[in-house]
Each structure stands twice: as C-alpha cells, then as structure tokens.
Image: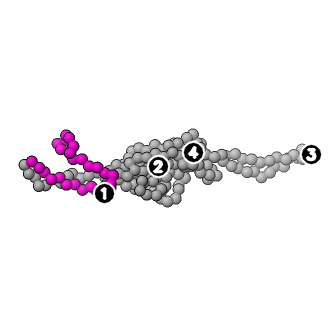
C-alpha cells in the first residue's frame, strides 16, 4: 500500500499538507495450485501465491466437469460467491468438501489486493476424486466351474467408473 499527499510551501516557508490518497499495487496472478490428499468427497488444495505479499487475499474456484464453477467457502463447502482470504486465514492447505466421487475437478485461484482488485485466474489444475469404497462382493449360484458375482456400485458414476474382479489376490477378470 502506498500513501500519497502533497506538500505546498508558500513564500514565507509555511507548509500546507493536502489530504492523502492510498492505493495498493496490483497483485500478481497466482501460480498453478497443487491438488493432493484426494478422497471420494474431498480434495486438498495448496495455493501458489507466486510471491505476492502476505496480505494478498485469494479465492479458490472449483468446477466439476459436468457442473458450473463454485468457490470454496470458509467452512470448506462449495458456494456461488467468491470468498477471499489470505493464505494464513485459509490455514493452508485448504480442503474442499462435499465433492462427488470419481469426478474430475478443475481448480484455479484468483488473487485480490487491498483495494479488492482481482487478478486473472491462475492456470488450472485438474484431478479426479476417488471412487466410493465398495462393499465385499456378493457370491451366489456357486457351481463346480463358476460363481456369479454381484456388487453395489455405492453411488459411483457409471460413465467414468470401471471395475475389475480380482480372484484370490491374483489376476483380474
């Protein structure tokens, strides 16, 4: 933040000072965020501040491949309004909650200076959440050379989830 004022001195050396104006310089565009500690309904995000000062605020946008963009809220949930906080207030890393299993999410970050002037968004990072954990398979119609195996997909999306059956800890079918 910079403060500007003007001093004027008359012919007798008496100085008058103007009112002052204050402005922040523009923040730098954040770097690519790091995505890790992926769960089936959560994802941990590390902001890359790109050497912005500590008082720079950031909003984190999360978009599912089949949905419109939302922002991480103070409690980690997703909402429509951008929430700007410093990295220390966000308490890095940030965990996005309430995500869907096995969906690719795109995350990007926007910085804002003390005058609330936002930067362009950072380059995007993308990651899939994990699938929901499956229950043990159901075995029935047991014959000499065959067994029928059924399972519950536990809400995993059918269009992006593939399954394989592992027999006796060995190969997959």
Upstream in the sequence, badge 2 or badge 4?
Answer: 4
Which residue is disc 1 drawn over? Answer: 155
- CA distance separating discs 3 and 4: 48 Å
- CA distance separating discs 3 and 2: 61 Å
Mark 3 or mark 2, whichever is nearer to me: 2
Taking the view exactly as shown, the residue that stands out farthest to the left is 144
Upstream in the sequence, badge 2 or badge 1?
Answer: 2
- CA distance separating discs 2 and 4: 14 Å
* Residue 15 drawn at (x, y percent): 85, 47
Q: Classify residue 169 by image quadrant.
A: top left
Upstream in the sequence, badge 4 or badge 1?
Answer: 4
Upstream in the sequence, badge 3 or badge 1?
Answer: 3
Query: Disc 4 on helix, strand or loop?
Result: loop
The front one of 17 and 133 is 133
Mark 3 or mark 1, whichever is nearer to me: 1
Upstream in the sequence, badge 3 or badge 4?
Answer: 3
Query: Disc 1 on helix, strand or loop?
Result: loop
The front one of 1 and 33 is 33
Query: Disc 2 on helix, strand or loop?
Result: strand
**123 relative position to 105: left or right:** right
Which residue is disc 3 drawn over? Answer: 11
The front one of 154 and 66 is 66
**72 relative position to 29: left or right:** left
- Color style of the picture: one colour
* Residue 151 drawn at (x, y percent): 22, 54
Q: Which residues are magenta?
A: 145-173
**21 relative position to 129: left or right:** right
* Residue 26 drawn at (x, y percent): 63, 46
Is residue 63 shown to the viewer in this render? yes
């Amino acid at each position: 933040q910079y403060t500007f004022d003007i001093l004027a001195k008359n012919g007798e050396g008496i100085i008058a000072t103007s009112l002052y104006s204050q402005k922040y310089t523009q923040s730098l565009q954040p770097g690519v965020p790091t995505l890790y500690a992926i769960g089936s309904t959560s994802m941990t995000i590390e902001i890359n501040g790109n050497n912005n000062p500590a008082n720079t605020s950031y909003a984190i946008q999360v978009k599912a491949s089949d949905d419109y963009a939302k922002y991480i809220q103070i409690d980690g949930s997703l909402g429509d309004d951008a929430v700007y906080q410093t990295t220390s207030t966000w308490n890095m890393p940030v965990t996005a909650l309430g995500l869907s299993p096995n969906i690719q999410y795109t995350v990007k970050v926007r910085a804002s200076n003390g005058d609330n002037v936002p930067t362009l968004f950072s380059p995007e990072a993308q990651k899939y959440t994990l699938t929901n954990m499956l229950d043990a398979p159901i075995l029935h119609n047991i014959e000499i050379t065959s067994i029928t195996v059924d399972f519950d997909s536990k809400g995993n999306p059918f269009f992006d989830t593939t399954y394989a059956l592992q027999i006796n800890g060995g190969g997959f079918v």
